[in-house]
Amino acid sequence: MKRLGGPKLKTPDMKVPPFLSDLYWDLRDRRLLPLVALIVVAIIAVPFLLGGSSGESNAPRSKAVNSLKREISGGSELTVVRAEPGLREYNKRLARLKPTNPFRQRFTNPPNGGAKLNQTTSTTTTTSSTATTTTSGGGSVGNSESTPPSSGNEGGGASPGGSGTPKKPHLTFLTYGINVKITRSGGKDADPKEKPEPSVKHKVLPQTPLPGEKAPVVTYLGPGRKGKKATGKVLMLVSNDVKSVFGETHCVSGDDVCQLLEVEPGFPVTFVYGANEVKYTINVLKIELVVTGHS
């Protein structure tokens, strides 16, 4: 049927996006369109169903809460009072407390049952302490022994408050001394028929020339040390007039000529001394502590 007269009307060209069309055909081919429709209907219907049931479920819950409150209160209604916190007055808080003197002794009972203060006993206690001093030789040790006055009736029965005289502490000074055997032999002017006789010196202190001041072949300095530990050997300072040394020794100081030797006790060492080339054999027998004095 043709339209008579008037302008021709054109319908708009509406095209579906290719993404939606592809999705539609995929769901149709896989027969998932009914499932998608069911999911959409469920999403729309769930809020309406939940909104209608909430009003009905709140009513029995409120009734149960009201009945529980009535059972707890025994039929009486609960009253809520507004709390107004604040600081309490110190007069009311400290009304029951009484002021006390902090400088007054409050506990008068003895700390131990049946014990008395200043009770005399017959126990004697002796303590000792050791002090160390070092001299230029490196081997001087001071030993101090202190003995406190004894408590009780000891000796002459002197009481703590009596006229007994307490012992005063004193110091004992010690150092390391040696026992040494010296044998003199040889020399240009010596008689070959003469037999050498050794001499023994006891408690030779540090800084002492050996065999003596007229012939200071070596000078005893003290015990040898390696760090803070004693080596058990003896240090000897060698004179410049010594031509050669024979024996088991250890040179501590010196380049061309050894000036400081470390000698082990029990091993003799022979020194050729002076222009006459006299031989002195020195053998350290023992090293021990020697008392040098008291305070």
Image: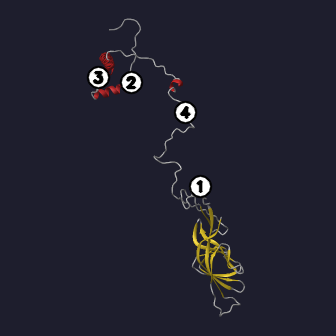
* Residue linked to disc 4: 100
Of the 4 image quadrants, the one containing the C terminus is bottom right
Of the 4 image quadrants, the one containing the N terminus is top left
Judged from the image, the secondary structure of the residue bearing numbered disc 4 is: loop
Rounded to the nearest angstrom, the CA distance separating label 3 from label 4 is 87 Å
* Residue linked to disc 3: 38
Q: Earlier in the sequence, mark 2 or mark 3?
A: 2
Judged from the image, the secondary structure of the residue bearing numbered disc 1 is: loop
Rounded to the nearest angstrom, the CA distance separating label 1 from label 4 is 40 Å
Rounded to the nearest angstrom, the CA distance separating label 1 from label 2 is 124 Å
Q: What crowding class fits label 2: few (fewer than 14 Cα within 10 Å), some (14-19), or many (20 or more)?
A: few
Question: x, y (%) of residue 189?
Answer: 71, 90
Q: In this rendered view, identify the residue nearer to me: 223 or 37.
A: 223
* Residue linked to disc 2: 17
Q: Earlier in the sequence, mark 1 or mark 3?
A: 3
* Residue type at numbered disc 3: Leu
The quarter of the picture where residue 144 lies is bottom right
Rounded to the nearest angstrom, the CA distance separating label 2 from label 4 is 96 Å
